[in-house]
Amino acid sequence: MRVAILGDIGQHVYHVGDDAMTHAAVDELAARGVNDVVLLSRNVEDTTARFGTDAAPTIEFPWPYADYQRYLADIRSFLAGEAHGLAPDDQVHPLIETLRGCDAVLIAGGGNMNSVYGWLLYERAAVVEIAHHLGKTVLIAGQTIGPLLYGADRDVAARMLSRAALVGAREDSSLTLGRTLAGPAVVPCLDDASFLASTSLDTTADAAPAPGTSAPATADSVPAAGSYLVGTFSGSTGACPRDQFVAAAAKTLDDAAELSGLPVLLLPHMAVEGEGGVDETLHAEIAAAMTARVESRHIASARDTAAMTARAALVITSRYHPVVFALDGGVPTVALSLDEYSDVRLRGAMANWGLGDFTLPLPSLLAGSLGAAIREVWERRDETATHVHSLRPRKVADSAAWWDLVVRALQGTPVEAPTPAPAPRLLADGSWAADADAARVVFLPMSAELGELRKATEDLEGQASAARAELQGWFNSSSFALVRKLASLRTRLRPRRNP
C-alpha cells in the first residue's frame, strides 16, 4: 500500500512542530508495516534528505482570501469537467498524478484547519478533493479545528472533514467543532508527535544533519538531563508591544533561573536555518535583556529539539510543541497563550495530561501571574512529574490504539474509535490561577473578535482591490474610450448660449 502524506514541510522557514508531526506519522506507519509513502512537500530534495522517503511537490495556495477561494473553485471545476481557470501547466496536474499512484492519503496533524492559515486550510481541502475524486481513502490525523472559520472557510472545512474516513481532533474544543461540522467520524486523539521526544532521545546523536543544517546534537552540545530550563517563544508577541513583552519575558526567565539555580536555554521552533529570524530574533532580544545565565540557540532539527526539550528541568513556552515534547519527558511546564487560537492549542495540549490550569493568557505575563505559576510549578515539580509519569502508560496505549486505527482505515477497513478516559486534573493551588482565569474571561473574547475583524478586513480589502481592478479595466477598455469620444463630440455639438 502506497500512502501520500501531507504535512506542512519543505518550507523556507523551518518549523520544528510541522516536521515533528510528519516524522511521527512516517514512524508510526512504518512501525505498522506501511513503508511505501510519498511526502507532499514544498521542497522535494530537502524533504527526501530529512525523512529518507519519496517526496513529491504539493500545491501552494496564494495567501489572499479571495485568491485562495478562487483557486480551490477552479480545482473543483476542473475535477468536475466544468469551465475553469487552470492553465495546462498548473501545479495541480502533477499532484493529481501523484495521488493517482497512491492507495490512500493521510493529512498529517497540525493547526491549519482555520482561517488564520486559510491558504493551508485550502491546500488540505484541495488534496482531499482530489483524493475523493480519484476514489482514494482519506485520513486526517490529530488536528486543531478552528476556532476561527470565517465566511466560506467553514463550509470548506466541513466538506473536507466529511470526506475523510477518520478525523483526529487533539483538543476537546476541536472535537466539539469537528463533530458539529462533520459528525462522528471526528474522534479524540493526541498530537501526532506526542511521543517523538522519547523515541528521539537515543537517536539524535547518531542522526545525519539535513542539508543546510548544523551538525546533530552531540554529548558536548546537549547538557545533562535536568540541568537547564528551556524557554521557547513565538516570534510574535500577540497584542503586547514587543518591548514590553521582551522586558517581561526576560524578567520572568531571570526569576525562574534564580529560583531553580539553573541556566536557561532558548530553543527556537521557527527560523530560517543558517539565517535566523522569527523565534531566533525574539530570543536574542530576550537574552540581551536578561541577567541570568542564558544561551540563545540556533534552530535545530525536530528530533534534536524534541529530545533537548524533554531533558529540561522546566519548560516555559508560548509555542505548542514544546508542551508536547516536555510532557513526553515528564517535564513540568508552564504555557503562555498569545491569543484565542494559541489558547485553544496550548490549554488543550496541557489538559490532555490534566494540566490545563498551567496555561495562562498573555495578560498574565505583564501582571506577574505567569511568574507566580512558574514558582508553584517549580515547587511542585516532583508532584507534577509523578502525575505525568502515572498517566504515561495509558497515554502511550491510547496513542498506539489511534495509530492502529489510522492504518486499518487507510487499508479500507471500517473502524470505530473508542473514547479515551479524560486525564485526572492536577489543580493549581495559588491565587494566580484565579487571576489568570479572570484575565482569560476578558482577553480571549477580545482576541477572537480581533481575529475575525482582521479576516473581515482582509476580505473587504480583497473585494476593494478587485473592484478597483475591474474599474481600471473598464477605464482602459475600448468601450470607455468610445464613451469619452462621444462625450467630447456631444460637448462640441451642443449649441452655445448667446451672452
Image: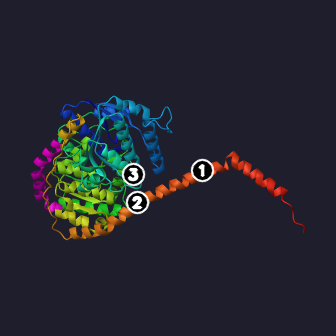
Q: Nearer the viewer, mark 3 or mark 2?
A: 3
Q: Residue at x 70, y 50 (%)?
A: 480
- Callout 1: helix, strand or loop? helix
Give x and y (percent) for residue 420: 15, 50
The magenta stretch is 377-401
Amino acid type assigned to the residue bearing label 2 in the image: Glu
Residue 403 located within the stretch drawn in magenta: no
* Residue placed under numbered mark 2 in the picture: 452
- Work out which quarter of the rendered image holds the C terminus and state it: bottom right
Residue position for label 1: 470
What is the crowding at mark 1: few (fewer than 14 residues within 10 Å), some, or many (at least 20)?
A: few
Disc with the residue nearer the chain's start (1 vs 3):
3
Q: Which residue is mark 3?
A: 153
| Circle 2 SS class | helix
Q: Quadrant of residue 380?
A: bottom left
Q: Residue furthest right?
A: 498
Is residue 315 visible in the rendered image? The answer is: no
Mark 1 and 2 residues: CB-CB less than 8 Å, in contact? Answer: no
Can residue 474 be seen from the camera position used here?
yes
Which quarter of the rendered picture does the N terminus lie within?
Answer: top left
Instruction: Look at the numbered disc 3 and give the secondary structure of its residue.
Output: helix
Where residue 72 appears, x then y in whole percent?
A: 43, 43
Q: Quadrant of residue 432?
A: bottom left
Where does the image place residue 451, in percent across and percent down from the top left? 39, 59
Chain-order first, disc 3 or disc 2: 3
Query: Quarter-wise, where is residue 381 in the image?
Result: bottom left
Label 2 environment density (alpha carbons within 10 Å; few <14, some 14–19, many ≥20): some
Q: What is the spatial separation of the Cα atoms under label 1 and label 3, in whole angstroms?
A: 25 Å
Q: Tag 2 or tag 1, which sits nearer the N-term?
A: 2
* Residue 139, label in figure: none
